[in-house]
Amino acid sequence: MNEDCTHEQAALADAVREVGRLNAALDAHAIVAVTDARGVILRVNDKFCAVSRYAREELVGRTHRVVCSGRHPEGFFADMWRCIARGQVWNGEICNRAKDGALYWVSTTIVPFLGADGRPEQYVAIRTDITQRKQAEEEAQRMAFFDPLTGLPNRRLMQDRLQQLLGQARRPGQAGALVLIDLDNFKEVNDTLGHGQGDALLRLVAQRLLSCVRHSDTVARLGGDEFVLLLGDLGPDLPAATLRAADLGEKLRRILEQPYFLDGGRVHAALSAGVVLLQGGEERADEVLKQADMALYKAKGAGGNQVCFFDPALQADVNARAGLLADLRQAQARGELQLYFQPIVQAERQVSGFEALLRWVHPVRGLVSPAEFIPLAEQSGLILPIGQWVLDQACAQLARWARGPATRAWTLAVNVSARQFRDQGFVPSVQRALARSGADPHRLRLELTESMLHEDLDATIARVAALRRLGVRFALDDFGTGYSSLSYLKRLPLDQLKIDKSFVAEITRNRDDAAIARTIVSLARSLRLRVVAEGVETEGQFAFLRRIGCHGYQGYLFAAPRPLRDAMRSAGVAPEALQWLDGAAAPPS
């Protein structure tokens, strides 16, 4: 009997020690609290006190509201209580607030202890501190969904919120808007003050944008100097939403055009914005963004510092442009590009050369205006292969002219686009065209415009000088219509100035135009440059220009731009000069 008692006592002692070890292990790892059926805390372990920063006596007798953070939505704890009140175990993650105000996260398991009636008498809550994991998750989410420079939502999060806004806008009375914003002169800030100051400017812009919208709206940064505003609940219908969006757009414009003060000094950075209204449609997010981009492009094209709304007509314009671009990509391969020629004559009306002008003869569209397709070629980059083709054709024609006694002294002028000229491969491309054709470089004249000289003048001079060393000559086209500066005229190794046709048109009736023409001729004479007048259409204009000492003349008075043979015939070129133009016949010895 005594022996049995001894065994029972030993077993009980072992069990107590085992429970003690389990409790010690649990206390070392977990935050433990025991509450009564009402949730009043009966016991807590040391870990609870350490993590919550509360003393045990500050916790016992109170409910867990003492550590409530307020971070969870309504109904979160109500759902939890419904679960455990039914005697079921509840698992979840809870954000609590410590006594010092710091937030901490716990992974929680609450186990009900049931009484004889099957109802919970007590609850044991066992929690694990997961604050570091949650912080790491939040940081990962921040990096994935927020712009690190401004703290604004990035493109990824913006796309998600745009989907939500489109869903809301489909409901009656829930019109919204998307605003795409671009800074007008951000590149200048980066180039002149450095990228650090550019980043500082973007942060200030983000703050101003946030100050203009409601907490329910979204301000996002797409990258660079592009921002997006997502605006919900603008009114019951499109007219009301349009008015509110217009008011906001004007507010944005006024606030963003105010000066910014950076370490580099006082900076201005106005906005251009494109607005798309959203209501009831089935538009996709990518479509809405494209529409906003069209409206933004329109605002930029109007000079910037403007807010433009998307118009369905813009979509038609974009579709037409896309169709034209698709055809232009095939035009060279299909042989639709042609060179037209307009003669340049001397005072005695004798042809001294021609200007080669690119034309596109489309099988359906007919003759497409250069004003339509040249800008498109520049924007798309097609101007580079097209420009090379023009140079090849022009040099080949010069080589053919060199075989004829009546044509071998002619020059040929070729217009060079800004995109083409600034390309690093431009000088080699001219060298290749000359080498392939065997043309005399001294007979090739490349025409530049004043607008091309405003950016990186040193690089421009270097390219011109490199080709001048080969013998190529240069003319400054449309002189007087851009920002004319004697400094670049002095530095550029030019051969010729061309008086723009806008001055020639009224030269016999407008004293100012006449004075400008005289000044250009006088300036050219001082700089030892030749002068060619463009757009000569009347005998009166021709006579005036001859009187003031112009060297060359070009215009409809002598011939319109036409295919070469037609242009030569209309210019009165001798018939025998036409017979070897295509290289089929050799010139007489």
Image (tube, rainbow, N blue to C red):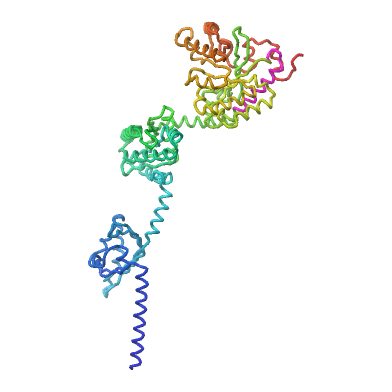
Above or below: residue 270 compared with residue 548: below
Q: Nearer the viewer, residue 84 or 561?
A: 561
Residue 104 x, y percent position in the rendering = 33, 59
The reply to whether the magenta stretch includes residue 397 is yes
Instruction: Say which quarter of the image contains residue 216.
Output: top left
Q: Residue farthest to the bottom? A: 1
Above or below: residue 105 compared with residue 319: below
Above or below: residue 301 compared with residue 582: below
Instruction: Say which quarter of the image contains residue 242.
Output: top left
* Relative horizontal placement of residue 182, taking residue 32 as reference (left or right): right
Assign the magenta stretch its main secondary structure.
Answer: helix
Q: Nearer the viewer, residue 250 or 80?
A: 250
Q: Nearer the viewer, residue 312 or 41?
A: 41
Q: Residue farthest to the right? A: 589
Residue drawn 63% across the image and 27% down it: 430
* Relative horizontal placement of residue 247, taking residue 416 as reference (left or right): left
Above or below: residue 348 compared with residue 113: above
Q: Can residue 377 be seen here?
A: no
Residue 249 x, y percent position in the rendering = 34, 34
Residue 386 x, y percent position in the rendering = 59, 28
Q: Can residue 515 be seen here?
A: yes
* Relative horizontal placement of residue 402, taking residue 283 as reference (left or right): right
Residue 418 x, y percent position in the rendering = 53, 27
Quarter of the picture holding the N terminus? bottom left
Residue drawn 68% across the image and 10% down it: 574
Magenta-drawn segment: 387-407
Instruction: Say which quarter of the image contains residue 52.
Output: bottom left
The reply to whether the magenta stretch includes residue 483 is no
